[in-house]
């Protein structure tokens, strides 16, 4: 529980640090930097900024001069005010938070790659009856190559199975190298979004052996970038399917669920915990870029309008849209918490 709260607080801190640094870069005074909402438990003023820890650890904020999310119509024309800056400067500040979340995730992936990534070895645990592998592969067979491509991990093997219609396998069995040919068959399966999809399978289960792969610095950068893109794509697809109704609101998770999952992963080990932290950081960055007025994405949308049309959004419209945005976020939070309680209490 404590580890989960610390990780979430760190993600929020890094997000707000991005806003803070971009604000300072364009000359905006930051009056308050708070981790958490509600009553301030501890504050320390450093130069012009009051650094605080607040009672409710479910978020955080930076309070810039001339900015008030509770009343977006309030403005200040002072040169160090948020509202006195150009729309493009304000957009830079707004992008700072999500941008730093993406940066944090990427750096975590790089660290994991350099430290050592735990992967499943491509060793057969058992074959599934009535599948292409059932008659030709045996337990403990290690798949070394597929169609001339060397493989080290189960994931690499799985990707190649989807790529080819015929598989020329080089396997290691009892210390000997054997060449085999398989033709995958297509089966209907459920993906992570519970959708029915078609996939090529050969019919093997992993033995469970693991290997640790340490990347060079250059390869670590490449692997980290791929992992970042995979995480971002997964989250974007999930949001798309949620918006289109392909998956239901019962799949949403709230802060209770995130804390619960994080606490469980923390018991497994540091690397799985770091991978989850990176995923949560990407998730936080993407969610904040949604064009909902109460989020960074909504403010970016208002500033883009001002930059393109050379006039500000009508104050009344901005105020009402912001209220609607907070209502949407509040509703989603309630649904997420309800789903969390149902899942946890229901086992």
Image: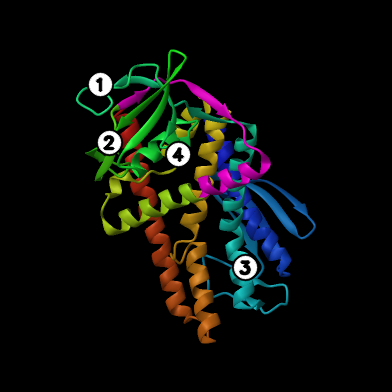
Q: How far across and down, in percent of the image, does residue 289 sit? A: 49, 61
Does the segment drawn in magenta span residue 141? no
Secondary element at image label 2: loop
Of the residues under marks 1 and 3, which one precedes in the sequence?
3
Estimate how packed mark 2 is, as few (under 14), some (14 to 19) or many (20 or more) residues with alpha carbons within 10 Å. many
**Residue 92, disc:** 3
Q: How far apart are marks 4 and 2 (CA)?
A: 38 Å
Residue under circle 4?
258
Secondary structure category for the residue under label 4: helix
Q: Name the residue under label 2.
A: 184
Callout 1: SS: loop
Local crowd size for mark 4, using a 10 Å CA cut-off: few (<14), some (14–19), many (≥20): some
Q: Mark 1 points at which residue?
A: 135
Q: What stretch is highlighted in magenta?
A: 204-228
Residue at (35% x, 46% y) in the render: 252
128 lies left or right of 266: left
Q: In the displayed structure, does residue 13 sit left or right of residue 197?
A: right
Foreground mark, 4 or 3, reads 3
Answer whether residue 255 is visible to the viewer in this image.
yes
């Amino acid at each position: 529980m404590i580890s989960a709260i610390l990780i979430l607080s760190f993600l929020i801190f890094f997000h707000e640090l991005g806003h803070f640094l971009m604000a300072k870069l364009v000359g905006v005074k930051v009056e308050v930097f708070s981790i958490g909402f509600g009553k301030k438990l501890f504050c320390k003023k450093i130069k012009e900024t009051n650094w605080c820890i607040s009672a409710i650890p479910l978020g955080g904020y930076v309070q810039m001069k001339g900015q008030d999310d509770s009343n977006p119509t309030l403005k200040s024309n002072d040169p160090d005010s948020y509202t006195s800056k150009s729309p493009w400067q304000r957009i830079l500040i707004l992008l700072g938070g999500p941008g730093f979340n993406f940066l944090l995730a990427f750096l975590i992936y790089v660290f994991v790659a350099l430290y050592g990534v735990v992967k499943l070895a491509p060793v057969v645990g058992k074959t599934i009856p009535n599948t292409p592998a059932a008659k030709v592969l045996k337990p403990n067979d290690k798949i070394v190559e597929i169609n001339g491509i060397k493989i080290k991990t189960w994931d690499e093997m799985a990707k190649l199975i989807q790529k080819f219609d015929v598989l020329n396998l080089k396997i290691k069995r009892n210390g000997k190298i054997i060449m085999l040919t398989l033709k995958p068959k297509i089966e209907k399966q459920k993906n992570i979004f519970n959708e029915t999809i078609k996939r090529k399978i050969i019919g093997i289960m992993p033995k469970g052996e693991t290997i640790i792969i340490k990347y060079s610095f250059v390869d670590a950068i490449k692997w980290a970038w791929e992992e970042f893109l995979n995480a971002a794509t997964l989250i974007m697809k999930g949001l798309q399917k949620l918006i289109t109704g392909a998956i239901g609101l019962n799949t949403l998770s709230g802060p209770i669920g995130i804390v619960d999952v994080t606490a469980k992963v923390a018991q497994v080990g540091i690397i799985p915990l770091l991978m989850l932290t990176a995923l949560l950081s990407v998730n936080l960055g993407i969610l904040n870029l949604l064009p909902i007025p109460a989020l960074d994405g909504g403010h970016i949308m208002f500033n883009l309008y001002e930059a393109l049309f050379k006039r500000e959004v009508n104050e009344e419209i901005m105020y009402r849209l912001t209220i609607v945005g907070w209502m949407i976020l509040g509703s989603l939070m309630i649904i997420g918490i309800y789903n969390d309680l149902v899942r946890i209490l229901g086992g």
